[in-house]
Image (cartoon, rainbow, N blue to C red):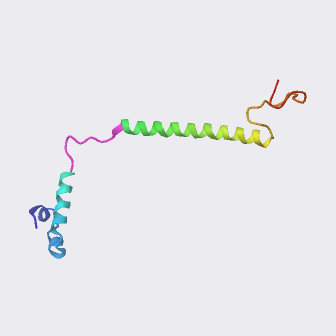
Amino acid sequence: MTSAAVAAGWGHVAVATGWGHVQAAWASAAAASAGSADDVGPGVLGFLVVAAIGVALFFLLRSMNKHLRKVRSVRDAGLEPGSKVGGDTSDKPDGVIG
């Protein structure tokens, strides 16, 4: 058993299980990740970027729903998408409007 495992308080577990190398690796990883002055987190800029993406997604989904409702209402009215509502097309060939 290493002194790092004993220092981390894993000595009694390592003796009982025979996994001393695992506890030693865990203790050294925990000591290494304790933090230093050079550690940098995402901070405010990371939050603002994620928040901006969320707001953009909200407006994109809202716009998509508006367009889908419009297409659905045109389809329910029996019109082709892109055709104008109203107007007399009885004397004109198919697809000609105006």
> Residue 21, percent across and down?
16, 65
Magenta span of residues:
34-44
> Residue 9, percent across and down?
16, 65
User: Most prominent secondary structure in the magenta stretch?
Assistant: loop
Q: Is residue 66 left or right of residue 60?
A: right
Q: How many marks?
A: 0
Q: Residue furthest front?
A: 93
Residue placed at 90% from the left, 30% from the top?
90
Residue placed at 12% from the left, 61% from the top?
4
Q: Quadrant of residue 18?
A: bottom left
Residue placed at 10% from the left, 68% from the top?
1
Residue placed at 19% from the left, 65% from the top?
22
Residue 93 versus residue 77: which sits nearer the camera? Answer: 93
Is residue 27 located in the magenta-colored stretch of the structure? no
> Residue 55, percent across and down?
51, 37
> Residue 17, percent across and down?
19, 74
Q: Is residue 71 left or right of residue 62?
A: right
**For residue 93, above or below residue 36:** above
Q: Quadrant of residue 73?
A: top right
Residue 50 versus residue 22: which sits nearer the camera? Answer: 22
Q: Is residue 5 left or right of residue 51?
A: left
**For residue 66, above or below residue 20:** above
Is residue 39 located in the magenta-colored stretch of the structure? yes
